[in-house]
Image (cartoon, coloured by chain):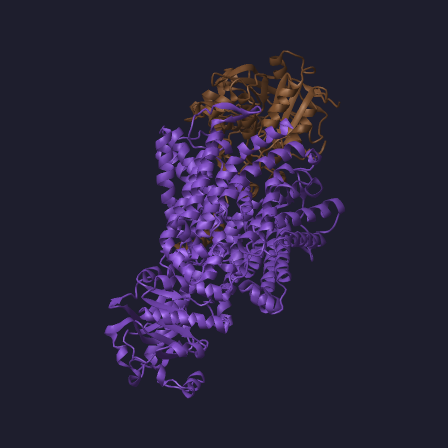
């Protein structure tokens, strides 16, 4: 009887799980003597790395992580190999995110986690901090930042630092890379160009507003509106606003889908001015979807990761490493890039720790928080320093444009400066 | 002004998607009686399939569209009808809602599992559809834009949606109001048994209804996907919930109104967003518009629908399968389970932090789930806003602990009280609603909580929320997970005891009374609003209490942790295990907490070979499998609305009964032909030839079987464990009135329903003019001419008088005959039958039968509740029918009227015919003996 099967299935699984938990392996950690970097010590315990993400949004992240892990294992770190225990999908559910983090720490006994998720909420990041498990990823969630200035309680290491530093009040400087590239396109000073800005009508939007408002004086922002994120929203009123104010550029800092719809609406209404956003550069995206490509045609997108189209040393490196690790990805997807660069940062920190002795959580923290600086590849991410970047972002970005249904690199990825916030 | 007009037009264009969904959803509801909360999920699956065919496999638009809409959707509809909804047809509103919630969770998961499994396991070359924006519709891609009017730009997809929506609305309106299929579907929804008795094969109409409903959902999904803008199941569901407001504006009945309502919804959203600048700083104000409209529509809907003549059918109580066991034996398995659980936790799991954590989470969730047992399991009301109670309590507790330094326990109490207050607020508007409108109201309020209340920074502390530190209670530090588990165990025990005692108390009886029959409860002096309010308040308090415990276990509460859709998944989990008992809630909690881990990681045993290890399902698939299993839950729900625990209990009971029957037979073999009559033994199947109980002397020539229009022989039937008829043999002759008299409890209604085919006979035969019809279902017997005029009138209260006549008289000429004979019906022909008086309803029942007389007519208490003058008229109708050769069976408790016109009389008492004879043999003395129970076979 089907029903009984369901009953037995659930009950059986529960029971098996409990039994296994009781009788299962413990897998303790043993400290190994430090060996020179470059040789792998036989029998040395591996350094386990876990992945935790909204797998749907960041496809390919596991391949990026694997690419770095395989490369590192050719020479080992402190004689030890890295072991990637797999990417866990939280399905955009905060409870699952916490539960998976707990299982990674307590059952897999990971040393570090590569984590990028919009539901990587304080519950999870607090937990990881309490267990001294560092996590790496795209630092747009508060867990990558200290809870207050000087607290030094964040165990999150964003590949471009703590992105919401200004909005959280941890820094009085803003991310100069957010407006410099577009100023190049518009051919005006960043202080002089006029904008109409759109943000999401939700928390993330209001939070982001703080950041963006600090980049421009009030006089520069000639119009602003909050764009709906739910339902089948209509964009006519926003198009009207743009047509009325005639800005130098339209800035869209909404969620992904609304951003595309907004650009599409402007295009449909025949608007031909400069429109840019921060989310729509996604390699491989345009080829698959004609309506999206049409909506984005002519628009610009800022990117916080080096664009594949830049074709710099950094892009060559990630492409080569992905191929070498056996990845079947045709190009570095956004997820793969996030995974790759985050793990690369971890790798550099592990190397730095190994140079000073055994790799343990405490040693790691001491070395990294004692003034660690990452090494930059040409055309790649900016230098990340800790503990500074728990309270600051790294102001680097690139700008691409969609031309003829393809992304074209307009301003190659490079680093700018932190700016004093505009208060009026 | 120009801008106002422009935005109104733009809003209407956007609102077309809501209209399209609302029309289909209204049809689905009116044709099946089930509000399909999984409509958005079906739309999503269709859109996904279309995307894979069109974009992935390169099929062109027409074949891809036809495949989805003409092959996939009908098959899915048939499957859902067969596996889930047909079996649920007679179930409560709550069970139906819970089944659709299960499907809402399961269907997208299954679809994604197939797509991604196919790609990874079989190497299918199709896109994985994880990040699709602006998917192509059924017209041009990329869409073309044009200037409609006043600079309103519409794209071709919007035009397609609008045209499709309008066409669908018109087609459905015609279907529902002007075709016989539509009439039959509405009749089945109104009163399924009566529809069967009028010849409607409710299995077929149900299938049609689900096929049409699913096809419409598929059309909405494929055509609407480019407007919705993304292939995400969450987004599709949300658009559907918003469109529900339009359905409610249409009164849950009117498709044209729902269509207009959808456009209005789009306009309202657009205009509020543009002009309500006063609300700029209220987080989420704009997003709340559709849910405010949904709620307002529901409150308006709570108008009185007119009087219902006759009795109101009550829900039968659930069967208690463990009734036959002594109390200690009933509880033994659970006691053992609890002991085992704690032994396991303390002895074997003490060092396994991860699993202890899972168990602690599971138990804290169990506390929340116990609130479902209270409001839905015991109270019979579906509440879809439990997640909101959890959040408000956790936020309140967090706020007072962090900002005001309160200690943990008082914060816990305050949080529970805050949840209780919210529960009262939630239930107040809904007190006069029942069933579906109440569930929808809780859904609306849940969403309002998500988008509005929990965005209020004062309460939620921005995006970082409140930290909740684990306390030390009575010297025990709850940071230690084992202590936490013990503490939670104590809490669960306490609440279980509370629920148990509640059932036994006066309040508990009040709850059951209100649930079973509101009019009866009201006339017994119970205040319905107060009782309902009490249940909601208690349930909310328990949910809040659990919420603080969950947050304490997690260490923090942040906005977005538990949203309404989470609450739906919770409900599905509890229903799966059994929502009426606390044990169901506990198992559901543990399952929910542990399933993520089990699916993701599998399990490994030490000291075993590696092939016994299971590494789980890997990241993406793990999510899907967990959710897909809820689909199985929904299917299982169809078999036993009370969950896995009830099915297990039922099977155990059947085993015990079999064992007892074997023992009884072995102990004392019975003489042949005598029924074993242990009071609590179930119906035992007897050989078909049980001795007839009609005394030989009473038979007349007219009873010779060859002339009988209908012959019952040795009929046994009953309900569940109780046999009501113990061997009825009765001939029914054309052109004669057979009166069957008997006191209450004799089995009169059971006899009527058995003849009509609504209750299957467990033994014996029914032969209609030489043809054995015992195996025929009600609608088949009706078509063969065996018609029942049931107790409490055979009318469809929601259909008009004309539509009621149409059920038996499809020809307008016949209906005119009926109006001619009964002018009062002609006067009231467009009124709903439910608003007629009792006498008028009985006339409406019998009028069509006069125009097209059946072969055999059975009338169950036709004079019940009617004035003497009306009764006279009714009896004259029977006389007229007799003259036209109909074989009539009149079953009555009141002897006086029917005795005057009867030809043969039988007395029915305690399930047996105790006397039978011609009317002339009946005198007052005999009557007295029968009614006082002194006549013997």
Above or below for B453 versus B577: above
Q: As drawn, is A335 to the left or to the right of B534?
A: left
- Which sits in the foreground, A46 or A151? A151
The location of residue B197, given as percent across then percent down, is 38, 61
Quadrant assignment for the N terminus of chain B: top right
Quadrant assignment for the C terminus of chain B: bottom left
Residue drawn where x is 27% and y is 76% of the image? B689
The location of residue A101, given as percent across then percent down, is 55, 40
Q: How many numbered marks does the figure carry?
A: 0
- Indicate the colour of chain B: purple
- Indicate the colour of chain A: brown
- Which sits in the foreground, A169 or B718? B718
Q: As drawn, is B405 to the left or to the right of B734?
A: right
The location of residue B567, given as percent across then percent down, is 56, 48
Can residue B311 be seen from the camera position used here?
A: no
Q: As drawn, is B731 to the left or to the right of A289?
A: left
Q: As drawn, is A278 to the left or to the right of B656?
A: right
Above or below for A63 versus B624: above
């Amino acid at each position: 009887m089907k029903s009984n099967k369901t009953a037995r299935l659930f009950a059986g699984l529960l029971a098996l799980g409990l039994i296994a938990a009781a009788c299962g392996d413990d897998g303790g950690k043993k400290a190994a003597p430090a060996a020179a970097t470059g040789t792998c010590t036989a029998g040395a315990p591996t350094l386990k790395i876990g992945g935790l993400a909204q797998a749907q949004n960041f496809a390919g992240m596991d391949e990026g992580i694997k690419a770095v892990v395989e490369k590192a294992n050719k020479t080992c770190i402190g004689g030890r190999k890295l072991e990637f225990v797999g990417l866990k999908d939280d399905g955009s559910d905060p409870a699952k995110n916490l539960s998976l983090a707990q299982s990674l720490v307590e059952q897999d006994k990971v040393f570090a986690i590569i984590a990028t998720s919009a539901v990587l909420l304080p519950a999870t990041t607090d937990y990881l901090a309490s267990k001294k498990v560092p996590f790496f990823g795209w630092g747009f969630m508060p867990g990558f930042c200290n809870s207050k200035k000087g607290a030094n309680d964040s165990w999150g290491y964003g590949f471009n630092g703590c992105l919401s530093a200004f909005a959280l009040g941890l820094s009085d400087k803003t991310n100069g890379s957010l407006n410099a590239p577009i100023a190049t396109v518009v051919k005006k000073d960043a202080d002089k160009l006029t904008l109409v800005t759109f943000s999401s009508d939700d928390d993330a939007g209001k939070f982001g507003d703080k950041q963006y408002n600090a980049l421009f004086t009030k006089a520069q922002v000639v119009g602003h509106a909050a764009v709906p994120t739910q339902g089948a929203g209509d964009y006519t009123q926003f198009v009207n606003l743009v047509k009325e104010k005639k800005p130098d550029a339209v800035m869209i800092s909404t969620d992904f889908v609304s951003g595309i719809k907004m650009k599409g609406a402007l295009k449909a209404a025949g608007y031909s001015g400069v429109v840019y956003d921060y989310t729509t550069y996604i390699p491989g995206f345009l080829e698959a979807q004609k309506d999206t490509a049409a909506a984005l045609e002519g628009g610009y997108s800022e990117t916080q990761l080096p664009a594949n189209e830049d074709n710099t040393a950094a892009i060559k490196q990630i492409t080569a490493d992905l191929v070498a690790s056996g990845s079947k990805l045709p190009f570095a997807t956004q997820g793969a890039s996030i995974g790759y660069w985050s793990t690369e940062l971890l790798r550099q920190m592990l190397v730095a720790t190994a140079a000073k002795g055994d790799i343990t959580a405490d040693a790691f923290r001491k070395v990294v928080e004692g003034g660690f600086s990452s090494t930059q590849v040409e055309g790649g991410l900016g230098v990340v320093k800790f503990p500074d970047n728990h309270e600051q972002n790294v102001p680097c970005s690139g700008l691409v444009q969609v031309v003829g249904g393809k992304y074209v690199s307009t301003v190659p990825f490079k680093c700018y400066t932190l700016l004093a916030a505009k208060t009026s | 002004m120009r801008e106002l007009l422009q935005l109104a037009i733009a809003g209407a264009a956007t609102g077309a998607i809501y209209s399209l969904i609302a029309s289909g959803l209204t049809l689905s509801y009116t044709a099946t009686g089930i509000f399909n909360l999984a409509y958005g999920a079906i739309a999503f699956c269709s859109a996904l399939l279309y995307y894979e065919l069109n974009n992935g496999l390169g099929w062109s638009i027409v074949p891809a569209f036809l495949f989805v809409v003409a092959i996939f959707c009908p098959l899915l509809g048939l499957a859902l009808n067969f596996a889930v909804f047909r079996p649920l047809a007679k179930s409560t509103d709550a069970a139906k809602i819970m089944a659709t919630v299960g499907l809402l969770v399961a269907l997208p998961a299954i679809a994604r599992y197939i797509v991604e499994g196919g790609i990874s396991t079989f190497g299918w070359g199709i896109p994985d559809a994880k990040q699709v924006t602006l998917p192509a519709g059924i017209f041009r891609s990329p869409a073309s834009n044009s200037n409609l009017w006043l600079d309103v730009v519409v794209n071709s997809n919007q035009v397609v949606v609008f045209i499709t929506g309008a066409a669908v609305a018109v087609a459905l309106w015609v279907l529902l109001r002007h075709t016989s299929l539509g009439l039959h579907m509405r009749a089945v929804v109104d009163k399924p048994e009566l529809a069967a008795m009028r010849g409607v094969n409710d299995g077929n109409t149900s299938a049609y209804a689900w096929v049409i409903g699913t096809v419409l959902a598929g059309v909405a999904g494929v055509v609407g996907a480019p407007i919705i803008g993304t292939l995400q199941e969450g987004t599709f569901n949300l658009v559907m919930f918003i469109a529900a407001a339009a359905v409610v504006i249409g009164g849950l009945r009117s498709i044209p109104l729902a269509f207009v309502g959808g456009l209005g919804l789009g306009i309202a959203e657009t205009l509020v967003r543009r002009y309500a600048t006063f609300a700029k700083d209220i987080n989420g104000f704009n997003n709340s518009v559709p849910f405010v409209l949904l709620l307002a529509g529901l409150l308006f809907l709570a108008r009185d629908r007119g009087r219902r003549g006759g009795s109101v059918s009550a829900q039968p109580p659930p069967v208690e399968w463990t009734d036959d066991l002594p109390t200690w034996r009933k509880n033994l398995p659970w006691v053992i389970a609890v002991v085992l659980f704690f032994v396991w936790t303390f002895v074997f799991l003490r060092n396994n932090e991860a699993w202890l954590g899972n168990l602690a989470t599971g138990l804290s969730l169990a506390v929340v789930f116990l609130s479902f047992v209270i409001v839905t399991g015991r109270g019979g009301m579906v509440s879809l806003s439990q997640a909101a109670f959890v959040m408000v309590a956790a936020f309140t507790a967090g706020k007072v602990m962090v900002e005001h330094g309160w200690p943990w326990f008082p914060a816990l109490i305050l949080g529970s009280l805050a949840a209780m207050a919210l529960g009262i607020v939630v239930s107040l508007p809904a007190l006069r609603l029942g069933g579906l409108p109440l569930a929808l109201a809780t859904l609306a309020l849940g969403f309002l909580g998500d988008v509005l209340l929990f965005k209020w920074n004062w309460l939620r502390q921005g995006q970082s929320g409140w930290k909740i530190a684990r306390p030390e209670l009575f010297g025990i530090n709850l940071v230690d997970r084992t202590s936490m588990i013990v503490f939670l165990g104590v809490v669960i025990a306490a609440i279980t005891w509370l629920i148990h005692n509640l059932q036994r108390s006066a309040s508990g009886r009040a709850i059951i009374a209100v649930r079973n029959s509101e009019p009866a409860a009201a006339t017994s002096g119970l205040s319905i609003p107060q009782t309902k309010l009490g249940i909601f308040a208690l349930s909310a308090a328990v949910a809040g209490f659990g919420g603080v415990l969950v947050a304490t276990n997690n260490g923090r509460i942040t906005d977005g942790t538990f949203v309404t859709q989470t609450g739906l998944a919770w409900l599905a989990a509890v229903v799966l295990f059994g929502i009426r008992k606390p044990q169901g809630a506990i198992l559901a909690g543990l399952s929910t907490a542990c399933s993520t881990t089990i699916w993701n990681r599998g399990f490994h045993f030490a000291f075993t070979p590696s092939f016994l290890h299971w590494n789980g399902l890997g990241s993406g698939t793990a999510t899907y499998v967990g959710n897909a299993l809820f689909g199985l839950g929904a299917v299982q729900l169809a078999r036993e609305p009370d969950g896995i625990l009830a099915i297990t209990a039922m099977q155990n009971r059947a085993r015990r009964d079999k064992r007892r029957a074997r023992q009884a037979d072995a102990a004392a073999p019975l003489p042949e032909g005598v029924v074993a009559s242990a009071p609590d033994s179930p119906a035992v199947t007897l050989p078909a030839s049980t001795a007839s109980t009609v005394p030989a002397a009473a038979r007349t020539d007219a009873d010779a079987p060859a002339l009988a229009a209908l012959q019952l022989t040795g009929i046994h039937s009953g309900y569940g464990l109780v046999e009501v008829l113990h061997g009825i043999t009765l001939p029914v002759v054309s052109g004669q009135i057979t009166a069957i008299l008997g006191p209450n409890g004799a089995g009169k209604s059971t006899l009527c329903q058995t003849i009509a085919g609504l209750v299957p006979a467990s033994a014996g035969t029914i032969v209609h003019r030489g043809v054995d019809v015992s195996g025929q279902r009600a609608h088949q017997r009706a078509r063969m001419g065996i018609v029942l005029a049931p107790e409490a009138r055979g009318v469809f209260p929601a259909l008009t008088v004309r539509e009621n006549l149409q059920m038996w008289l499809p020809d307008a000429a016949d209906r005119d005959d009926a109006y001619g004979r009964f002018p009062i019906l002609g006067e009231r022909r467009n009124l709903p039958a439910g608003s007629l008086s009792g006498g008028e309803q009985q006339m409406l029942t019998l009028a069509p039968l006069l125009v097209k007389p059946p072969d055999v007519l059975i009338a169950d208490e036709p004079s019940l509740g009617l004035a003497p003058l009306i009764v006279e008229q009714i009896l004259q109708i029977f006389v007229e029918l007799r003259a036209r050769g109909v074989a009539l069976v009149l079953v009555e408790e009141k002897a006086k009227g029917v005795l005057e016109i009867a030809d043969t009389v039988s007395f029915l008492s305690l399930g047996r015919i105790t006397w039978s004879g011609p009317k002339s043999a009946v005198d007052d003395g005999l009557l007295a003996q029968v009614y006082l129970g002194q006549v013997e076979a």
